[in-house]
Amino acid sequence: MAHRQPKLDLSPHVSDEVRKTTCYMCACRCGINVHLKDGPDGKKQVAYIEGNRDHPVNKGVLCAKGSAGIMQVNAPSRLRAPLKRVGPRGSGEFEEISWDEALDLAVSWLEPLRKTNPEKLAFFTGRDQSQSFTSFWAQNFGTPNYAAHGGFCSVNMAAAGIYTMGGAFWEFGQPDWDYTKLFMLFGVAEDHDSNPIKMGIGRIKARGARVIGVNPIRTGYNAVADDWVGITPGTDGLFILSLIHALMKAGRIDLDYLARFTNAPCLVNADTKSSEYGLLLRDEKGKSLVIDRETGKLTPFDQKGVRPDLSATYRHAGLTHRPVFHLMAEKYLDPQYAPEAVAERCGIPAARIRAIAAELARVAFDEAFELDRAWTDFRGETHKTMTGRPVSFHAMRGISAHANGFQTCRALHVLQIILGTVEVPGGFRFKPPYPKPAEAHPKPHCHATPDGPLDGPHLGFVHGPDDLALRDDGSAARIDKAFTWENPMSAHGLMHMVISNAYAGDPYKIDTLFMYMANMSWNSSMNTRGVIDMLTDRDDKGDYVIPHIIYSDAYSSEMVGYADLILPDTTYLERHDCISLLDRPICEADAAADAIRWPVIEPDRDVRGFQTVLIQLANKMKLPGFTDADGHAKYTDYADYIVNHQRKPGIGPLAGWRKPPEGSGVGGTSSDDNVGGRGSPNPEQLDKYVENGGFWTSHIPDAAQYYKPWNAAYQDWAVKLGLYDSPQPYLFNLYVEPLRRFQLAAEGHGQRQPPDHLRDRIKAYFDPLPIWYDTEGDNKGEEFPITALTQRPMAMYHSWGTQNAWLRQLHGHNPLYLPTNLMRENDLEDGDWVRVTSPHGEITVPVMHMAALNANTVWTWNAIGKRKGAWALETDAPEATRGFLLNHLIHELLPPKGDGLRWANSDPITGQAAWFDLKVRLEKAHAPAEAQPAFPPIASPVGTGPKSLTWKIGS
Amino acid sequence: MTLLPEKTDRKLGLVIDLDTCVGCHACVISCKGWNTENYGAPLSDQDPYGADPTGTFLNRVHSYEVQPEEGAAQLIHFPKSCLHCEDAPCVTVCPTGASYKRAEDGIVLVNEADCIGCGLCAWACPYGAREMDSAEKVMKKCTLCVDRIYNENLPEEDREPACVRTCPAGARHFGDFADPSSNVSKLTAERGGMDLMPEQGTKPVNKYLPPRPKDTLEMKVSGAPPLLTPIAEEPKGFLGWLDRTLGQIDGNKTGGR
């Protein structure tokens, strides 16, 4: 047959309309173009989703989840109407009710609590992207019991960064992709900031920069890393301290940077008998003091022209004071941190540790460069150039989800600070509203008053025992025991302890558990079986131990079956949202930015956006903050709140297109003389966002782009924008004094004293300089020698919602991956099954070989395993038959130590759930019919999905 | 049997960088989305919520482990779609002329109106790059987004395949291999771009850039001591060095010694 070809229409119609909004398939919050076409019924339907090229986060690209959003919006697992439980909890038996009935029922439970015991409501939100709003609601309800999911996710990452340097990785900052030449990435679970990290790695590899991956598992970013360091889990801190040891010992550190911008020169009370031993020497205004090299005199660190001395000591009134840097030299030059001393424990040869240290030093110092940009520091000194040190770091959850995670994250920050690579060209850069030191954040508030609001924001940063959330008798004020001696610096709360504590009535009983987007009866809890029992157990009178459970979700998740009242949420394309500077915004290192979601399609079900439902509940209860002086509701729905709420005069949820502040003469748009941020509410604000593609940006001036914590131009810009009310320059805390305050208390100083059983632990672990300690012993590492880890696949990371029809074809079940040695030792082949036993429980699951894996580690994809009956999947779906969770092996408490005490399986400093301390042993097993433990099906309120899909809107 | 054009004016295709692909599947789903809504029949899914979900995809990512003779095992992510071969056996095997290679740009397409769903082309393709759609019973394959790359209803910057536009790591590149000055020709020349299974004689247009050598740091800095010569063994000696150093270099940048 001769060559012939048909005539093609090369310019077919693409879509009827493109609406630009913000993705919610994970935590990245990329901009998306939603292509719409008229469906058969004339209503607009989603035809195609792509990335928005103008958007500051993703610049046009989009991941698999983002493009699969169309299958989220049409998912059969979407809830359709409010539901009231009619069968026993866990049966999945519900009846549909009207919204009026649903709201009245909720108010009938909530209103009496608010009037008498507000703390009897525990309100916890999971993958909530509206925390500044949900916390405001909880505060005005009056309960101290509010948090989101950070405590079981990654509070170590956030808190260690903020206490150390006023910001962290992820939403807080990013590598300087423009200039970095060596990028070092730590940690399992390659997720947060996912598209920007992929874009950045692609960019730097294209110009020949080196990527070093430190991760027991060589997937994803580690697969493309030039060098892979297959570290033994839980030893990252030891490895990092060894790098610090090698660099200090060779003098390959940035002394000038340490002297100017960190508390290395700050003087510490060195008198072991003093009640202030280990505290910083301060003046009457509380400013830490240094010796000025120019004058040799004691002076506050921030005075004009001061050149802090890294080495000088100070003796006064019989007390010797030594600079922090002396303490660091003593600690880190110790041979216990020599590469040879740590190599075996970390699973990294000593020569390799030295090679990495040498390469870090070579790139930081020998490839240093100058940007021809003058800037003025907070001491008034003008620098003609900006010195670049092109080494940057980033870390994932892996290093933080251990009981030593806080100190490990601290160690990583100390490493990048001694190299002088933070907030310099080529290094790590903060994104507004960061940098923001711990002192600029609120402290926790926990004082509940019947029929009144809480005394302030729930979550915050403690600076010593006085800031703990304790009642007069010393017991925990919060149901999750956040900010207590058990985990004093629990800045994100402890969502993973709420159900366990509420069930135990420890520290007290609650009446209503109210949750949003949190799958606590399945993959979001440790000890899943135990949590299910706690949710369904009854007391002597036959009443549920946790009397009322209200749950909001858009989908038929495993948690739905365990609630009494379901408030069905919309999907992300059917709602208003704001990604606010009051929360964790979408800023980039060179610009402030925020964004909205708006209903690009209308819901076809009787569902309401959860935030609007909260406003409707607030209005029914006339909560303060939501009610004006005349008793009228301030906001009708969430969109109204987004536009008209003011956290303080001129500052609201969105920073863009505000109206000129009274008398200022400037407008609310971004221009040279007005950076945006401040101004009164503008009724056209949301329209302006929609016109601009769903987001707003304000560029940071060139001279303010780097050295932000110390750069006068940045500080002035941040004040104009409303991030601060006055310039707030500060020093990086290599030495974190609040940790020392807790140690002092444990040593017997001060009024507020820890319980005796916690004294030794606080003394040992609350070191104000980063340390490493082994967590294997607490987890019975001798009997259970293998570490078991989980991570989400990139195509599912942090996604909330259904088992997406397209994505589940990529990852529909999850084998347990074993390294070569464990496959051989156990005589296993791909597809064989193993019994995995931990100190807490056992599972029987299929295995697969993976050679590029630490020899002492097994792992699987997390949260693929589903309960039969959930997510509108059929009961024989592979997620429910072969898929499994490691959660069954993990308890919220450590194995008993024989002292009769309950020790939480979490970081003793922050309370972060220690998911990755899980130790197991393996044995080959006969193949069971299904992965074990198998759970009985739960009735589905939505049925199951269709048998085939041919999703095409156009003709 | 169907004849190929004697020559094509251009050779449009992809360069896929195996050194950069992180295996995220963004290209897979973007392709699925565009081609479900656009060219020809939608890419259907059977049993999408059941025991054995199987859908039609024009692009898939496979992952392979490689064990070098020395050093750690490596993981390679390998995206695979039609390579738009110059000597495309899928075209010549077609009994109806439904499979064809475009003379102007070399894109291999299926004219669904003429496809009888016999499946011969899928058997002939050595790369497994064609998939029969179970709902429509026609053969589906990568179109190189022929309905995007010339589409005047799209902004000019969007006239590239959906997989290229969406790739977060920038591992996919689109262009004309017949033009030696194109981005894809230059990348292929600079990075040693390779044919997939050249022994099959299909002369694929798409090229793969091989992963760069891995785990070379120790070799590079072997003899690390010169870079990390100790300035002191003990804290006391360190503080002595510190005093001397601060005295010498006050006001200068440090760390490089």
Image (spheres, rainbow, N blue to C red):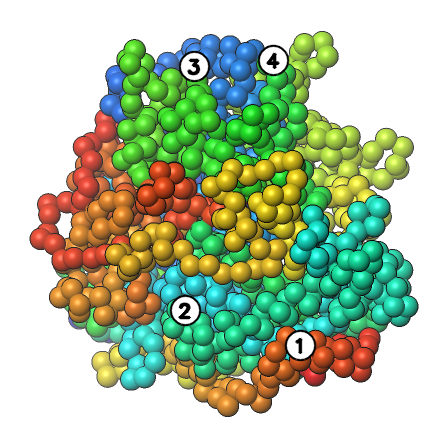
| Co-location on one chain, circles 2 and 1 | no
Residue drawn at the location 48% of the way across and 88% of the way down:
B222
- Residue A915 visible, this orientation: yes
4 or 2: tag closer to the N-terminus: 2
- What is the x, y in percent for residue A360? 57, 76
Q: Mark 2 falls on what kind of element? A: helix
Relative placement, left or right, of A203 versus B67 is: right
Label 2 and label 3: CA atoms lie apart by 55 Å
Residue A451 badge: 4
Marks 4 and 2 on same chain: yes
Distance, label 1 to label 4, CA atoms, is 62 Å
The residue carrying pointer 4 sits among few (fewer than 14), some (14 to 19) or many (20 or more) residues within 10 Å by Cα, namely some
Verify CB contact (< 8 Å) between mark 2 and mark 3: no
Q: Considering only order in the chain, which callout, 4 or 3, is on the residue closer to the N terminus?
A: 3
Which amino acid type is shown beneath numbered disc 2? Cys
Q: Which residue is mark 2?
A: A346
The residue that mark 3 highlights is A102
User: For residue B48, which quarter of the picture?
Assistant: top left
Protein chain holding label 3: A
Q: Amino acid at mark 3?
A: Ala
**N-terminal of the two: label 2 or label 3?**
3
Residue A565 visible in rendering: no
Give the number of the mark in front: 3 or 4: 4
User: Tag 4, which secondary structure?
Assistant: loop
**Chain letter for mark 2:** A
